Amino acid sequence: MAGKGQVLGESLLGEEEEEEEEVDPGPPQIDPATGQVIPRPKKKKRRVNKMGRRKLLENLSNKPTDFQIRVKVLEARQLQGGNIQPVAKVTVANQTKQTRVKKSTNSPSWNEAFFFNFKKSPADLMDELVEFKVFNSKKLRSDSLIGSFKCDVGMVYLEPRHSFLHKWLLLSDPEDTMSGAKGYLKVCVCVIGPGDEAPSFKPVASEESDDIESNLLRPAGVQLQPATFTLKLYRAEDIPRMDSAFMQGVKKVFGIGEEQKELVDPYFVFSFAGKEVQSKIMYNNDHPDWNQILKIGIQFPSMCERLKFIVRDWDRVTDDDTIGTNILATSLISSSAGSGPEDGFLPTFGPSFVNFYGSTREYSDLPDEYDDLNLGKGEGVAYRGRALVEIQTTLGELPEVPVEDINNDDILRVQKFMRRRKYKLHAAFLNATMVSAIDAPVEFEVSIGNYGNKLDENTAPCPSTTQPTNAVFDGCHYYFLPWSGTKPCVVVESSWEDISFRLEGLNLLLKIIDTLEANIEQVRIGIKAKLPTPELAQLLISLLDQLEQDCRKKLPEPTPGRHVSNELDRLTRDYREFELETIANNVIKLKTSATDVLEAMAEVENYLQILKNIAKEPQNSMPDVVIWMISGDKRLAYYRIPANEVLWSQNPDYIGRLCGRLQTLQLKFPGLKAEKEKVSEVPAMLRTKIWLGLANEDDAWHRMQTEGELAVYAETYENQCNIPVVGWTKKGPLGRPKWSDSQGKCSLPRESFEPPPGWRWEGDWYVSPELSMLFDKDAGHKTYMEECYEMHSRLPGTSWGPATRPWTDVKGDEMAPKDSVDLPPGWVWEDVWQIDLSRAVDEEGWEYCVESTMGGYGPVEKRYHLCRRRRWVRTRKLVEDAKQKKHKLIQEKKIEEAAEGWEYAPLFNLKFHATERTMDMVRRRRWHRKMICEKKGADCYFAMKFEGKKKDEDDKEDFNAAYAAPRMFLTFKKPFKYQMRAYIYQARDLLAGDETGLSDPYARLSFLTQSSVTEKKEKSLCPTWDQTLIFEELEIYGDPRAIEENPPEVMIELFDYDKFGSNEFLGRTKAVPMVKLDPADARMPVLQWYPISRGQEDGGELLAAFELFLVPDKNASMESLLAGSDLPFLPPKKGDLFLVPNGIRPVMQRTAIEVLCWGVRNMQKFQLSAVTSPSIEFECGGHVQESNVIKSTKKNPNFTENILFFDVMLPREELYMPPMNIRVRDHRQFGRKPTVGIHVLKSLEEFRCDPVQAELAEDDDGVQGGLVNGGRGGEHVIDMPAEERKVERKSGPQIGQPLKSFPQLELPALFRGKQEEPDPVVDEEIDWWSKYYASTGQTHKCKKYIEKGQDKIEVYQTHLEDVDFTNGFSDFCSTFELQRGKDEEDEESSVVGEFKGGFKVYPLPPDPNDEMPSKVFTNLPSSTPEECIVRVYVICGIDFQPNDTSGLADPYIEIILGNKKISDRDNYKPNTIDPVFGQMFELTTMLPVQKDLTIRIKDYDIISSDDVIGETTIDLENRYLSKVRATCGLQKSYCIAGVNQWRDCIKPRQILENYCKQNHVSGPHFYGNNSVKVGKKIHNLADYEPNKPVDPNVGPADERLALHVLHTLPMVKEHVETRPLFNPIQPGIEQGKIQMWVDIFPKSLGPPGPPFNIEARKAKDYVLRIIIWNTVDVVLDEESITGEKMSDIYVKGWVSGIDEKQKTDVHYRSLDGEGNFNWRFIFPFSYVPAEQVMEVRKKEHFWSLDETVQHLQPNIVIQVWDNDKFSMDDFLGTVSLNLNAMPMPAKKASSCKVSMLPDITTGSEVKLVSLFEQKRLRGFWPVYNDDTGTRTLTGKVEMEMELVSVEEAEERPAGQGQEEPNMNPKLDPPKRPETSFLWFTSPWKTLRYIIWRNYKWYFIGFLVLLLILLLVFLFLYSFPGEVSQWIVNG
């Protein structure tokens, strides 16, 4: 049974799956009895790859979102057990709901829907479980479960449309997995997120009876097997400190000292699928050896995906802290069957280390703000240890004990996996720019694992950090580190297991992926650029060749002796080889068979997905490389790089993609804090090279450094302090050693440095000043403001006078008077000294305080103030050529400072500066000494020698000082000079920064050590800057060819300028410049759109291009690179700004933009008052046009003058077209014109058209050709839409005239016709619903209608606006939503109104004297309001969101149009979420004043207010104006009566005439009634109607012909649309759908036709009479006292769903299984004949207000029972008959068998009949019992069934049982055998029939024996007397 369905678990692990398709495309053969499709033979289709489905679930967001999970439980089949009462329960993530209980059936039909709402993050929700359970409600709770099925939400989410539709689930018993199927449950499940469309749960017509086989979901392998995950946990290392050292300190004081302890108590937790098991706690141990086995029992295969390893720290008092979490996906460590060369493998892993990442390692007593990172949420920012584990899976057993110890053999076996090798990690830092930390020196630390961690005291020091450097201003905004020619390098030595074979394999796959992605991108660009097919084919072939060649590359193998591999390595390698081989073979096939480039690309995408899935390495035990930016002692930002990406290998194919290559890294702030607080700045940008490899291969790194020289220096700092009188000295309270490292932590005297073994000194110690000290405070600034403070003081009661320090700086340090401030060379003063009055000061600029050193200045003078100051400022400007200035300055400085090299600071932990100030108490200088390596690979750490130390000093300091690390630099001889030109043209669709909904944007560019800013553009979201920014004098070190290959990135940030407060960040983007080493290079950079993003949100696009020129050197030799020609000329200027030069800026073309400015709608209030007099401003490419003002939107929201015209120069290329900005202003009192709404139209592409040629408009034939055949030539014709209205209005009075000339066609005739020709048959059976069902394919509900072959209608599964040909009714004018205010993510939609209008864009002749083409927008309809009749037909609802606790709702309709509201509350539909409304509402309205029709569905509540379930809004105006005539759908045929009667207000012929007028088509010319010419084409009625029309009510021929012609034109046909409902409480989540349509009739065209009657069908009442005559061959269930088999038989019957049971009397003591009854059952029920369903109305509970209506199959259940007086009656057998499709009864009892009944497994060889057609049936039917799972015959019932209508039942009455009136037919009491009676009520009968019958021979024998005994007794009694007499007498 379960052989075919889709296997869960397979789709999870994502192997290839063979898709099957059916052979016969014909209609399915249906077996009506069971509702089964007979399975068809299947043929195999090509393999479809299902790899990569899990991919979707990997990068899910962690942001909580609204979700809804809908579940519909339809029915169950073949549930195990006889006569059970099933109920189904659905549990989703701890919310449980259950269905109704169904009575006595094992094929229940529930048809109930449940809605589960969640506000959860997608990542969490996908792991939750969905569980279905079916219970037998009769049994006790403990053993009532029949079967269950579960899977995770993620699995449903991966299905198409995120749903399982009409799937059968195989139920199994979770406890007893071997017991097989317990039944089948049919369900629909879907997961809906915001914006998802909900699939319909309505049964599809052909699936009405469905094939369990092809739709079955079963747990893989049918049986879930018990299994055990065994985790061998060996050891962990590098666990960070987690506890405070307080107790340690206390013990030390009291001398209770044991040895130093590690302050962490780790234990390990292993969790899976909600179960977890933990190891023992290892106290005070940061490298615990647990050596334990942890086991978890599971059901395999599990629908859960993630294994979790957690290391926690035990705490005595507080909660245990999590140290780190590692999540491992089971799909990476297992493979399901058939996905590899073998049969798949169970989860297996290791022995291998797993790494833990989380927050930073440094311990602090304060709570950790990044604690979430340790729980596995977000990217861990630091390494937190690793654990050695091994996982095995064993099937068929569950663990007895969860934890046990590992035996010694395993501990020894795992030793070989712990063999370590020495690795070296090298990094060279070339630039650090955009540095955000400017308060303290900045350094960068590189670490791998815990090696290189500078702040961890347990690791040996190594040169893992760059030297601390102060950041320097770059002249515009950012700061950079001035490393110039000495680039810092770091090296970290570490020891790891050698797993290079794993990482090299991964690198190979990643390289294949990179190549393939680059090639795919090329083909995509080719497709976009519309290259000719041969060229595309060539690109594709080379892509496939490359892919095949790559897939044939050999994967690395572990080398014996060097690598130790495990089982998973072998399996993964086989699996990868198999996949690569498969891809290579498929590629060869694809090369030969591909016909279409797009199809082939789809296949290639598939291969890419497979490659991505196998390019994952679960056993990557080498920790990631982490780079930290540290300022002072604080870690600020980080970047994590997987180790394999920088790993070196001998084989070039296996080298990591970033190994030794120059890369640009944008550091990140740790944790989610930056995202939450919306931190916009970049912490820093780094250009680095990183290399990781075995220590003995690191000469490869040195070989790569061709551009500079690697040098190593010993470093120490000389520290001094300033003591009054004494001056600067090393003695005194320094607070740190005289010679120390930069932090002052350890003492490093110069003389104690000894070169390490293998190294020697070169040269002597020299002072090496810190580079950033050489930069003045004005470095990089073009203008600089000098400031000084004038200080006054006084004694109490005296007047103010100069203070002891009359002039100071802002810190209070003394400086020269303002007039003696020197002007540095190259600068000029811009103005004179001025008092700064822009601060909190009095009118003379003074501010006052008590004491100058305490600060606290204020502007008001008080008597106790003794100090005052005022600030003088003066601006200077740089004029001298920057180049020589810089050169001169640095030279002077160097000479002056080199001798001294001191840097000063008030205290050691503050920022140092180069010049001494009065507050400075300390100073230091840096000493370097160069070292040369003599022996390759020698360690470069210094072992320091020390003289006698006191014993009690801290040992830690000794240890640190004993090993000092040197500094390393990459030194370059001289830099190359470059010039960068940035061409910033424009941006579009930027985020709004101001409340008006606009921004004042400017762009800031940062490139290496310089940055620059564009001008700001006022109030625009689409600014055009058209500006070139030139970066002069860029010094870049290194080989220009390397720069050309890998240029530095340009970072562009956009800001919104604000006058007050800081400027708001709008987003950033990166770009790579085009490098030109020869300025004469002829290539031109192309403007490109770069996407801008702000955090996660999209922030628009920037159009720009960038060039980087190598500046030629005049003195260079000819061969050198620098001998190029001069730089290109500077671009032209406009004012002070450079423009974008001509070859780069877009080519312009004279272009016309016609704007149809129709009106505004739904404008919301602005500043609390309504928007009543708006006008609109259109801006495109800097040109502005303004519409006129609407007088009052309440009277007419349309503009009186509709057309605006732009004649502008716009780019020819669509790519560069500027956006159209639409801005609405309201005209208010006092001349105020606030902006009340804006819309930015990104692209005008869709509005482009060809110019209208004047002469073509008159050429009727050409136009017609274009129109009917849909060619482009006539596009302008199609674009002159709704003139129809004008014409109609003009001809309003004339419409009546043609009507009068055809009296038989006058409107009243429509109604007369109906009365004249009644068609009784049609009236009864055929209604509007027949037409609807015929159109939706529900053929069983409208058989007669289909037989008659009448019209069908279009039923659209979406709203009419989404149907292809309607284009959202935007053909006349489109609707543009207006926005206002800032873009905030979490706000509700900011739509504040709509603008109705349209655009046409076409080129104009370049010569202004040429004739202009005619306008496109002509013949517009009148824009005055029009009164219309609106009819709203609401048919039914689908899948409404339930609002009551019962899981149902009581929906009713509310219609709102303008200020009219119709509520249909009285006609609510009780207890349903799929109501059939069948209602029509008629309203009148004025368009366009009241254009939005809202249909709202509400839920009826007696007590509380009615809730809104959902609503949908229709824009009637768009439908009214559209040329596809959406006012009233065209019917298929023109009938004057009947169900298809014409309902429009004008007839087809008139519609055709209007259409021709409106679209300038000649015609229609009628020739007689049967032929018409429209345009060029002649239409004949005979072509459309070869046979006579079927419908007797058809109208005249000319109208029919006109209608046929209209059907060939693009017009809306008669239809039903399905509209989704939405609720503002859950925006974006669909709340159900309604099916409906709307008709609009303008009153000026006359009254409309009669409306359709769409009332819901009514049920008819029937009575089913069943006479139970006899039963035969019933199994004998009892044994009598006398040991005979017998049964006390009675028969029970009921109609399923009504469940009112009736019983016969009991036929006692049937000895042969025969029972005689002559008993009548009477079952009244309601039935809808047209739909063949029974309607059941009953209250759910006694307290329910309303009856719930259900539509069920009319099933009658007959059961045979055995009556017991003193115990429960025994169930013997049952039969369930569907009155629509029941098996014919057998004529004789002998031919009555179980095989007569239809069954899931038998086909449709059973002949079925309908009792509604037969009316009466008599014969034998079998009853059976199937509690064992197979049907066994347990008896036969002879009965007669008769179906009568209620009227007949009254004419021919009959009583129940044998009661009066006992007639039709009369039933005589049954002639039962004498033996049939109840024993204790008839003692005489009992004696006669039981005792006498069974024991009479015993009685007779007993009497005879008694007589004989009596005779003997008498003989013996009388014998002695007789004898004595005889003797006496004898």
Image (tube, helix red, strand yellow):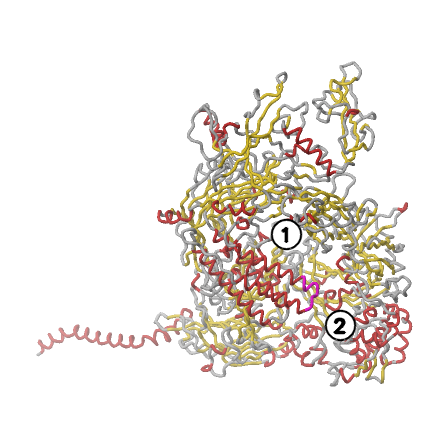
> Which residue bears the numbered disc 2?
1613
**Quadrant of residue 34 in the image?**
bottom right
Along the line of sight, the residue nearer the viewer: 465 or 310 = 465
Give coordinates of residue 855: x percent, y percent.
71, 24
Q: Nearer the viewer, mark 1 or mark 2?
A: 1
1002 sits left or right of 1815 in the view: right
Quadrant containing the C terminus is bottom left
What is the spatial separation of the Cα atoms under label 1 and label 2, in whole angstroms?
A: 62 Å
> In the rendered view, would you say 206 is above or below 470?
below
Q: Residue at x 42, y 58 (%)?
A: 395
> In the rendered view, would you say 986 is above or below 1310?
above
> In the rendered view, would you say 944 is above or below 359?
above
Give coordinates of residue 1369: x percent, y percent.
78, 65
Tag 1's secondary structure? helix
Residue 137 seen from this side: no
Q: Which residues are magenta?
A: 525-532
Amino acid under label 2?
Lys
**Quadrant of residue 1916 in the image?**
bottom left
Q: Residue at x 47, y 25 (%)?
A: 953
> Which residue bears the numbered disc 1?
1045
Give coordinates of residue 109: x percent, y percent.
56, 67
Q: Is residue 1805 magenta?
A: no
Q: Is residue 526 magenta?
A: yes
Residue 269 seen from this side: yes
